[in-house]
Image (spheres, rainbow, N blue to C red):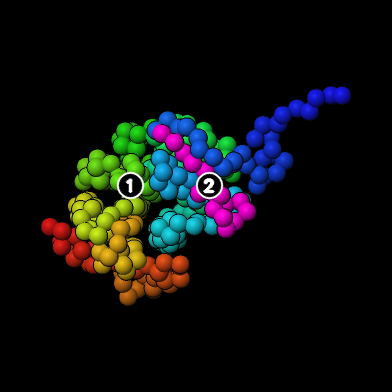
């Protein structure tokens, strides 16, 4: 009897595009451990933890389904800006911080002609997520292994339409990625109508978010914030999304801001949108 050949994860995906090599367990990676856990709600849903901290969520075959609220907040402002200021057929989007490439999968699906570059520090993790999940191949989604700061400094002027920073060492963003100098480095890489989006994890003091808002205001004429009410009032630890651009971002009272707010209020954790004026007042409280 002929022996049955063992097929690779790649060949299985070719026959069944929604099947992946994801298997629950703990895996050694370059920076420690990655744990892959079924989410318990979706048959193809997975939660990725890095060194015990939640990093990403993926539903295989459904790249537009983003389980983490802060990611839904990011795409609410991203999609609005693309519609208003950028060409959706020629997008160059850089994702600083990879994880399971959830946002890159979303962007590649919603904007099929986009070119997404994911900068991931952990080389072994980058290998694993390619095997575990249905991440489009390069150039739609390219995973570049390297330090986010070092790689960003290598970008050519005006070579990116959007830069999204979602980088954490355990539960904090490395301080060098929060400075005014780093914001200027990102700005140097953006086209004139480009957008910088960052995810700030903060505690009840909101000191980190105020400092990051002030740094963005040093560089960009327009800055906005998205977060839930409890977070903005300093009642808990969580995520605050900050956005910077040289072209006008939606102003409160405008149709664009109302449209974003409707999307944000419709989520499982309703969120608020703040325009530049409110962000300036927020940043001043930390001065």
Mark 1 residue element: loop
Most frequent secondary structure within the magenta stretch: strand
Q: Determine crowd level at label 2: few under 14, some 14-19, many 20+ residues with C-alpha closer than 10 A.
A: some
| 162 lies above or below 23 | below
97 or 185: nearer the viewer: 97
Q: Determine crowd level at label 1: few under 14, some 14-19, many 20+ residues with C-alpha closer than 10 A.
A: few
Q: What is the span of residues highlighted in magenta in the rendered image? A: 32-47
Q: Residue 171 bears which disc, if any?
A: 1
Q: Residue at x 67, y 40 (%)?
A: 13
| 4 lies above or below 233 | above
Q: Residue furthest left?
A: 287
Q: Are marks 1 and 2 in contact (CB under 8 Å)?
A: no
**Location of residue 33 in the rendering, given as x and y in whole percent from the top left corner:** 44, 36
230 or 112: nearer the viewer: 230
**Location of residue 29 in the rendering, given as x and y in whole percent from the top left corner:** 45, 32
Mark 2 residue element: strand
Seen in the image, is 25 located left or right of residue 6? left
**Quadrant into which the N terminus falls:** top right
Whether residue 111 is visible, yes or no, is no
30 or 79: nearer the viewer: 30
Q: Circle 2 is placed at which residue position?
A: 37
**Location of residue 235 in the rendering, given as x and y in whole percent from the top left corner:** 27, 65
| 35 lies above or below 43 | above
Q: Residue 282 bears which disc, if any?
A: none
Whether residue 285 is visible, yes or no, is yes
Q: Residue furthest right?
A: 1
């Amino acid at each position: 009897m002929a022996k049955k050949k063992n097929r690779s994860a790649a060949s299985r995906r070719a026959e069944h595009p929604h099947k992946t090599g994801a298997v629950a367990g703990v895996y050694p990676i370059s920076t420690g451990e990655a744990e892959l856990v079924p989410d318990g709600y979706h048959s193809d849903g997975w939660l990725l933890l890095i060194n015990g901290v939640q990093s990403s969520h993926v539903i295989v075959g459904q790249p537009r389904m983003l389980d983490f609220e802060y990611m839904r907040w990011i795409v609410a402002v991203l999609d609005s800006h693309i519609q208003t200021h950028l060409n959706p057929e020629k997008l160059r989007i850089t994702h600083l911080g990879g994880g399971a490439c959830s946002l890159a999968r979303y962007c590649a699906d919603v904007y099929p002609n986009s070119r997404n570059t994911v900068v991931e520090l952990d080389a072994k993790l980058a290998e694993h997520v390619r095997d575990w999940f249905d991440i489009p191949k390069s150039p739609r989604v390219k995973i570049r292994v390297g330090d986010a700061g070092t790689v960003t400094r290598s970008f050519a002027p005006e070579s990116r339409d959007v830069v999204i920073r979602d980088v954490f060492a355990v539960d904090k963003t490395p301080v060098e990625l929060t400075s005014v100098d780093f914001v200027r480095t990102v700005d140097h890489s953006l086209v004139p109508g480009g957008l910088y989006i960052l995810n700030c994890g903060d505690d009840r003091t909101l000191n980190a978010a105020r400092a990051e808002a002030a740094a963005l205001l040093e560089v960009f004429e327009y800055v906005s914030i998205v977060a839930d009410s409890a977070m903005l009032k300093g009642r808990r630890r969580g995520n605050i999304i900050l956005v910077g651009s040289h072209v006008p971002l939606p102003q409160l009272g405008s149709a664009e801001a109302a449209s974003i707010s409707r999307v944000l209020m419709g989520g499982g954790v309703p969120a608020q949108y703040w325009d530049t004026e409110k962000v300036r007042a927020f940043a001043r409280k930390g001065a």
